[in-house]
Image: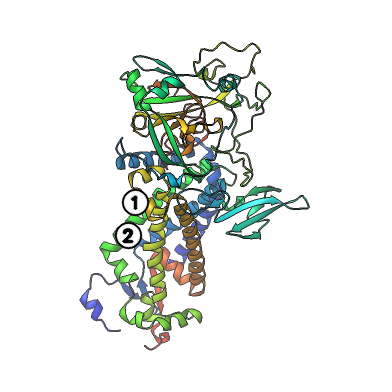
Amino acid sequence: MILHRRKLLTAGAGLAGTALLGGCDRFSGTETGRRTLKVGEDANLYVQRLLMSPATLAREFPAAMISPWFKPNGTIDPPDRKFRALAAKKFSDFKLTIDGLVQKPLSLSLADLRGLPSRTQITRHDCVEGWSCIGQWSGVPLAELLNRAGLKPQARYAVFHCADTLEYAGGGLEGGDGASLWRPEHPSHVRDGAIQLAAAEDWGGGAPTATDAPKDDWGQGAPEPEAPEDKRTPIRYYESIDLFDAFNPQTILAYDLNGKPLPVSNGAPLRLRVERQLGYKQAKYVMRVELVDSLAGFGQGAGGYWEDRGYEWYAGI
Amino acid sequence: MSTESLDATPAREAPETVDASGRRWFYRHPAVIRAAHWINAAVLLVLLMSGLQIFNAHPALYWGAASTFDNPALAITSEQGRDGTNRGIVTIGSHSFETTGVLGLSREGGTAVDRAFPAWVTLPADQDLATGRRWHFLFAWFLVLNGALYLLYGLFSGQLRRRLIPDGDQISDFGGSVKEHLLLRFPEGEEAKRYNVIQKLTYLVVVLGLLPAMVLAGLAMSPGVDAAWPWLTELFGGRQSARSIHFIAAWLLVLFVVVHVVLVLVSGFVNNMRGMLTGWFSLGRPEKETAR
């Protein structure tokens, strides 16, 4: 009797093991699988928010600990024509738009932003891949801008629209003006050659949605260039945070890195810093901040370029 | 062995019985411990495999708060040899080893790919950091909840103290236990009712040392936890140190499991498995019992 039961249990354990190894991949590929695996993210968000107040600050470091090289990652040189035109004039024509669910939409030049109260912080940038760099960031607290614009009561998230195209809907990878787009494999594809990553992730470009329309969706108001850009729909980087993070004193739109104007490789003219979360939340090339009540209308609805490709919206871990 | 301990704590002593053939049976593992053991085994397997997937996204380790890219403590990479073919290389400090086929460069579906750990040990098998993270963080919750139940039960039932804290006579006969291990000779009868001293100390290190350290080092890497509990990341010497400790502790757990499984096999596989599956562990027949 006991032996019979043991055999049964051993066989069961063996079957479970095989199913585990072979079946996990299939499970995570199904909708139920994806939703089940997401429970961990929800638990992390809930518990971490219990441990923090909106004003809890990330650790700040002494100047002596600043990394000699702040590893640029993701897009390091946007191929977008409009961005290149702005960069060529050192962003003197750049205007940051703040709109959406606000009382008074704002349009601010870099000079305007530099004239506002600023915050400087030396923090650790934690990439989702596992590496870290320490840098000194200076910029305008997002709370400062949101208070000037005045939130409407329905506003729940700030969406950051970025200038950099990562791919074209339908999978095209060639930039409109001849610049070749590399196919990103991770939120921070390592390109320095020291640690080269291989094996592309198999995610498609995703179907274009209404908000991916090939218009000037970051509201620069600049006239369309003479020569037409790539006719395909560009999929640009975007990110989003909720108001818990938006009003944190360390949440800034940074224009300086280590005391110098932010280089293009690190996200010029403006880069979001959300210090209690991972690197892919720190959107580069921020052109427009849109206040919204739902993330459903952007990209594929997960709240960010990488979130649409399976990464967690809450990147506190 | 007298019946004194039975008299002193009648309700706490595990049940014992003798079957028709005269074989003595001892109820060694309560159901909660058995369930926790097998859940833990499955959860650790998922955590190891998804953890290696995550490691593959940046297959290098550093010490301190930030990464020193030119100078990793450990790196698993591939590089092109003089003959034009790629080789897998593991670098520890200033020493390099070729590991082609397993680490740095391995076969995946017939083609050689550059990846630190091979497809057959990662979850998912393909390079897919996002899904690897989701597996890892969900199963980390299972590890914590299962571990918390185990520890609470162990503490309040007295199992942890009675089963894992070495008895006085065991400590004074530590050398005897070492000899017993080396000769692969394992006790039957009364003495088999308790773990030997090396076993007790190892389980204590794993249960109260390695597994909690694993969880804490994992949490220390989280920027959110670092903001809420800066002392934790500091305790591990910084985020990159925490990541390295997490990696080392993972392999210490693998080492433990390997030794554990080997000893389960050589010290009476059927009896051990029966014990951990049904709770009942055979103490043998009294006539076979060695005099003590």
Q: Are marks 2 and 1 on the same chain?
A: yes
Asked if labels 1 and 2 touch by Cβ distance under 8 angstroms, the answer is no
Pinpoint residue B140: horizontal percent, then vertical percent: 42, 49
Res. B64 mark: none
Task: Give the spatial CA distance, label 2 vs label 1.
Answer: 24 Å
For marks 2 and 1, the one nearer the N-term is: 2
Label 1 sits on residue = B231
Quarter of the C terminus of chain A within the rendering = top left
Give me the chain letter of mark 2. Answer: B
Label 2: state its secondary structure. Answer: helix
In the image, residue A111 lies at what x, y percent?
A: 44, 21
Image quadrant holding the N terminus of chain A, namely bottom left
Question: From what the image shows, is residue B218 above or below residue B7?
Answer: above
Image: B260 above or below A172: below
Q: Which residue is located at x 32 percent, y 18 percent?
A: A152
Q: Amino acid at mark 1?
A: Trp
Q: Is residue B269 above or below residue A131?
A: below
Coordinates of residue A243 in the picture (x, y in percent)? 35, 28
Q: Amino acid at mark 2?
A: Leu
Q: Residues within 10 Å of mark 1 (few under 14, many from 20)?
A: some
Task: Please determine whether, in this image, residue B124 is positioned above or below residue A107.
Answer: below
Residue B136 seen anywhere in this rendered image of the structure: yes
Q: Is residue A1 visible?
A: no
Could you say which quadrant of the image residue A99 lies in?
top left
Direction from residue A263 to residue B150 in the image, left or right: left
Which residue corresponds to the image point at 58% horizontal and 50% vertical from the top-left?
A: B70
Lateral position of residue B45 relative to residue B2, left or right? right
> Can you identify the residue that label 2 sits on?
B151
